[in-house]
C-alpha cells in the first residue's frame, strides 16, 4: 500500500524570472502583497490535479481526475512577488473515488515565508462524456502520526462542511436574530446612508474557447475559479475604501462541467462585512452554445481584507441586507467567517 509521503509532489514558480514576475504582478510598482492571486489559483488547481493523477494512474492508466471542491485556502502571509514560490502537495486522504490534496505554499528563506495552506477535493473518473464513471481507489496506509492526523482532519473538514450545509436551513440563533434585526432597524432611520447589499454587485460575461480546455471537451477548472476570483475582487472594492486583498477562500464548489462554446455569466455580490473583512459570494452560470441548457457551474465564497500600503488592517463600513434572500446570504457568510476565525489565524 502507498503512504501519503509517497504521493508528495513539488513544483516551483520561478518569480525570480523577470518576465514571469511581471505576469504575476498586480501593478507595476513596489508593493507588499503584489501578487495576482487569481493566477495562483490556476496553478494550485493544476498542482492538485497532478498530485491526484499520479496516484490514480497507478491503478487506472487511462483515468483522469476532476476538481470537485476547494474546501478552503487560508492566506497566512502576503507573498513577495520578487521571490520564488514553492508548492508542496500530498494526498491526505483517499475515499472511495475521492482524494483530498493538501498543498502548502512557501517562499524559501530563513525563516521560510508560509504563504497559504490549501485543501482540494478531487474525484477520479474513467470514460468520456455521458459514459464517464467514478472509479474505486485503494486507500492509503498511514504509518506516521502526522499522516494519521492529516487524514483525521480531512474527514473532520468533510463532516464540518456537511454540518454547515445543514445549518444553512437552521433558523437564526437569538444572537443572530438580534444582529439581523439591528441591521434592519438602522435602515428605518431618516438619515440612513448605509451600504445596501442589494446594490453591491458586479458581473461579467464571456464565451469559452479551445485555449481554455484542459481535458478533452472540458474547460480548465483553474481558469474558471481565476475568473470568479477576479470579478469578486473587483466587487469587494465597492466596500473596501483602501486596498482589498484576499484573506481566505471559504469554499468553491464545482457542480457542472463547462464546455467549449458555452457562454458564462459571472456574478458576485458583497454579502457580509466585519471589522476589516469583506465576504463576497460569487457564482458562474453556464449557458450552452445552442442556448438549450443552463446550469450553475460554480459557487464560491471569498473573504477579503482591507489594508493600507503596509498591509495594516483598515476598517470597512457595515453592509445592510434588506430582503429575506439577502438575510440568508448575510447569515451564511457570517457563520462561515466565524468558523474560519475560530480555527485559523488569517492574514
Image: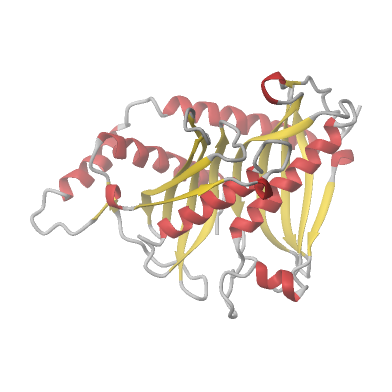
Do we see residue 175 in this rendering? Answer: no
In this picture, residue 182 sits left or right of residue 222: left
Residue 163 image position (x, y, % from top left): 50, 27
Q: Quadrant of the N terminus?
A: top right
Please tell me which residue is depicted at 37% across the width and 52% down the height of the picture: 273
Residue 208 image position (x, y, % from top left): 58, 45
In this picture, residue 126 sits left or right of residue 311: right
Residue 226 image position (x, y, % from top left): 58, 52
Q: Outermost residue toward the front?
A: 290
The one nearer the camera, 149 or 98, is 98
Residue 79 image position (x, y, % from top left): 65, 66
Q: Quadrant of the C terminus?
A: bottom right
Quarter assignment of residue 8: top right
Quarter assignment of residue 220: top right
Q: How is the image coloured?
A: secondary structure
The one nearer the camera, 265 or 199, is 265
Q: Is residue 279 above or below residue 259?
A: below
Do we see residue 47 in this rendering? Answer: yes
Amino acid at each position: 500500500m502507498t503512504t501519503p509521503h509517497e504521493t508528495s509532489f513539488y513544483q516551483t514558480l520561478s518569480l525570480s524570472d523577470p518576465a514571469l514576475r511581471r505576469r504575476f504582478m498586480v501593478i507595476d510598482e513596489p508593493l507588499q502583497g503584489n501578487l495576482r492571486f487569481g493566477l495562483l489559483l490556476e496553478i494550485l488547481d493544476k498542482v492538485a490535479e497532478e498530485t491526484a493523477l499520479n496516484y490514480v494512474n497507478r491503478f487506472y492508466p487511462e483515468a483522469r481526475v476532476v476538481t470537485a471542491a476547494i474546501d478552503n485556502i487560508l492566506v497566512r502571509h502576503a507573498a513577495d512577488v520578487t521571490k520564488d514560490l514553492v508548492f508542496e502537495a500530498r494526498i491526505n486522504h483517499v475515499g472511495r473515488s475521492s482524494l483530498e490534496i493538501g498543498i502548502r505554499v512557501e517562499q524559501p528563506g530563513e525563516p521560510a515565508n508560509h504563504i497559504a495552506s490549501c485543501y482540494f477535493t478531487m474525484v477520479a473518473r474513467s470514460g468520456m462524456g455521458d459514459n464517464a464513471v467514478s472509479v474505486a481507489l485503494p486507500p492509503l496506509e498511514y504509518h506516521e502520526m502526522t499522516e494519521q492526523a492529516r487524514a483525521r482532519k480531512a474527514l473532520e473538514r468533510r463532516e464540518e462542511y456537511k454540518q454547515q450545509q445543514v445549518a444553512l436551513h437552521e433558523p437564526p440563533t437569538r444572537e443572530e436574530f438580534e444582529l439581523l434585526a439591528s441591521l434592519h432597524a438602522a435602515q428605518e432611520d431618516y438619515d440612513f446612508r448605509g451600504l445596501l447589499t442589494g446594490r453591491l454587485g458586479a458581473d461579467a460575461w464571456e464565451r469559452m474557447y479551445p485555449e481554455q480546455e484542459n481535458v478533452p471537451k472540458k474547460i480548465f477548472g483553474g481558469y474558471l475559479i481565476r475568473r470568479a476570483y477576479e470579478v469578486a475582487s473587483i466587487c469587494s472594492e465597492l466596500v473596501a475604501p483602501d486596498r482589498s486583498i484576499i484573506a481566505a477562500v471559504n469554499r468553491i464548489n464545482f457542480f457542472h462541467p463547462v464546455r467549449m462554446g458555452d457562454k458564462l455569466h459571472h456574478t458576485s455580490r458583497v454579502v457580509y462585512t466585519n471589522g476589516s473583512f469583506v465576504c463576497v459570494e460569487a457564482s458562474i452560470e453556464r449557458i450552452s452554445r445552442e442556448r438549450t441548457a443552463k446550469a450553475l457551474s460554480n459557487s464560491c465564497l471569498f473573504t477579503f481584507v482591507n489594508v493600507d500600503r503596509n498591509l495594516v488592517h483598515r476598517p470597512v463600513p457595515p453592509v445592510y441586507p434588506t430582503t429575506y434572500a439577502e438575510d440568508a446570504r448575510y447569515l451564511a457568510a457570517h457563520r462561515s467567517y466565524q468558523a474560519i476565525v475560530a480555527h485559523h489565524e488569517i492574514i
